[in-house]
Image (cartoon, coloured by chain):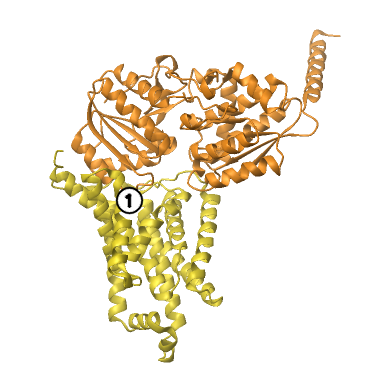
Chain colours: A yellow, B orange
Amino acid sequence: MALPSLTLLGQSLLSGLFIGALYGLLGLGLSLSWGMLRQINLAHFALAFLGAYLTYQLASVGMDPLATLALIVPFFFSLGALMHWLLARFSVSAFNSLLVSFGLTAIIEALIQWIWTADFRRMESGYGEVKFRVGSLYVALPELFTLAMALALSLLVWAWLRHTYAGKAMRAIAEDAPIAAAFGVDVRGLSLLLSGLCSAFAGVAGLCLALSYTLAPGQIYAWLGVVFAAVMLGGLGRPLGPLVAGIVIGVSEALTMAFTAPAWAPLVSFSLLIVVLLVRPGRI
Amino acid sequence: MSIAIRSILAGALFALGLAAQSALAAPSGPPVRIGSTLALTGPLAATGLVHKIVGEIYVEQLNRKNGLLGRPVEWVLKDDQSRPDLARTLYEQLITVDKVDLIMGPYATANILSAMGVAQRYNKLLIHHTFGTPSLAKYEMQFPAGGLAGDPDNTIPKLVFDSLAASAKPPKSVAVVTSKFPSVHFISLGAREAAKKRGLREAAFLEWDFGNRDFGPIAARLKDAKPDFVWVGGLGLEGNLLIDAMRKIDYMPPLHFHLFPAPGPLLKAPGGENALAATTFEEHPPFTDNPVAAEFIRLYHERGAKAGLPDNSVENQSAISYSSWQTLEAAVTGARSLDDKAIAQWLKSNGVDAIVGRLRWDGPFNYIYGTDLYKVKQNQKGKWVIVWPKEFAAPGARLITP
């Protein structure tokens, strides 16, 4: 068997890095809400696709796709806070949140299909055509943007949780909410804030999806398995975890595709997950 | 009485006569109920919607005429959510609870296979349009109306490589890249064999799992392999994802063929120019010379726009869907009965002239081997045009080889 060229190796590494960043970005909000609010929010994927469709819609009436964030982020923040308020109002447990959010996913999917039909939609944007050449390698702007957003948001959340009073209070809530409340932490307000942020991250991930992919409502479920694997590998409630795990999965998959049969790539993420579960069962 | 007045009176009488005749021909009595499911939600919904629109058009056309055997037609349509297990349950329901008179196939191989099992259990005739693995159809009363041969792994590669061989610049090397989705995978393996037999150098052979998201490494491997022609055994958007990935690394193969693409998005995709695909029908002569097809195209444009479809052109999916309804109408009319066995018997000994061409079922398990109704089309200037075989090519069109 001929050895793959360095260009093939480099391009595959880049491809894995970028898709891994998208896994990380999609997993960020899911990991935080699961680990810190004890809500397994399956609707996160549906929200990301709703964000992608809204970006598509706003861009189709002439708005710059990046500028749509100015509308999408506050809207999704409010949506996330509202969802959390409802779940808290009815004291929905972690397991039940899985069921409720699955129902919400189906509702959002139906809503998307009702508004935009089940047919494929592709956002026309100048950004999709921009790419940079680095030696013999190419870097596409939408993917670079996704990596930048994933890095920036993960680092900002990490810094917020580690270095600010609100962040430390949030970690205290995740540890033991009643005790944190006894120490004067505003459990309700901070939970609403984090929930809103998680949902806003889904909106940002939606923009990245719309920049790079053709959309169809049924694709909501296509990302579920691998992003769950990234979230679990990265550790629940750890802001840098999904990004690091996503990149590990993405790069492993890409190298598998570059060196062996591409059909083996999906085995990578779940094999890694099984290994981590066996070696470090307490991580999740 | 002047000649003019006489003419007007004669015209009025003629119009009255026509109206009376049409009133007499209007269907009456209890409706003939036709049951089917379609993937109206779930991953196959984009194409399921196309089949829904076509079915609605056809049933309306039937009811505007004489219905079926003089009775109005009612289409009982259920959403199988793109799930074969649900399709099975729903067909069971359609037959035992809804007590439909006839059933029509759902969309896509796995769901059709589910429906076929139920049809076999209840001895119901099943006409279907999108069954991609003919070797699995072992029921005597199933009738494919999609124009595919019993051996598409032979006929489609032959068609494609014939078209390339007749082009101005026949390829010398080929890369076969394919999804492992069953109905495309075995045809792609056929393409691999066909290429070998024709002495083409195999630059690459790559398979991916259905649902693959990252086509970057596959694109990079193709760029390394530099084939003259890429056979993409892709389903739906997979071809688009591969094209996107290739464009991102500034590479496009001279020629690329897509087996079962999402035709609308591929038509509009940057990089989709000159892409080849298989089809049975496109919106140009000689197909549009058929007045039935022309009327269908007009109605489909209208309904597609109303349903919010981004691409309203009639192509393979909508045409084979229409042809399957034409088959049902012809068979019921020909057999003069709603009895499944009588209709099946009629179909076995008669062909049907549908808008995709003449359909017939006189081979093993109602499939014909060695020939089909498929053609090669190419995306030329943002429009799909058939380029091979020559007798079906759009006026003036021929395969562009960059």
Q: Circle 1 sits in a helix, a strand or a loop, which is it?
A: helix
User: Which quadrant of the figure has residue A156?
Assistant: bottom left
* Quadrant where the N terminus of chain B is found in the figure: top right
Kindly identify which residue carries mark 1: A266
Q: Is residue A164 left or right of residue B37?
A: left
Q: Is residue B125 left or right of residue B111?
A: right
Rendering coords of residue A249 (x, y %) = 28, 57
User: Which quadrant of the figure has residue B374?
Assistant: top left
* Quadrant where the C terminus of chain B is found in the figure: top left
Residue at mark 1: chain: A
Is any part of residue A146 visible from this angle?
Answer: no
Between B221 and B368, the one lying in front of the other is: B368
Disc 1 crowd, CA 10 A, few/some/many (<14, 14-19, 20+):
many
Rendering coords of residue B118 (x, y %) = 60, 38
Rendering coords of residue A92 (x, y %) = 53, 74
Residue at point 53%, 57% (across, down): A106
Between B243 and B173, the one lying in front of the other is: B173
Rendering coords of residue B295 (x, y %) = 59, 25
Residue at point 26%, 47% (across, down): A130
Q: Amino acid at mark 1?
A: Pro
Give above or below for A281 relative to B12.
Answer: below
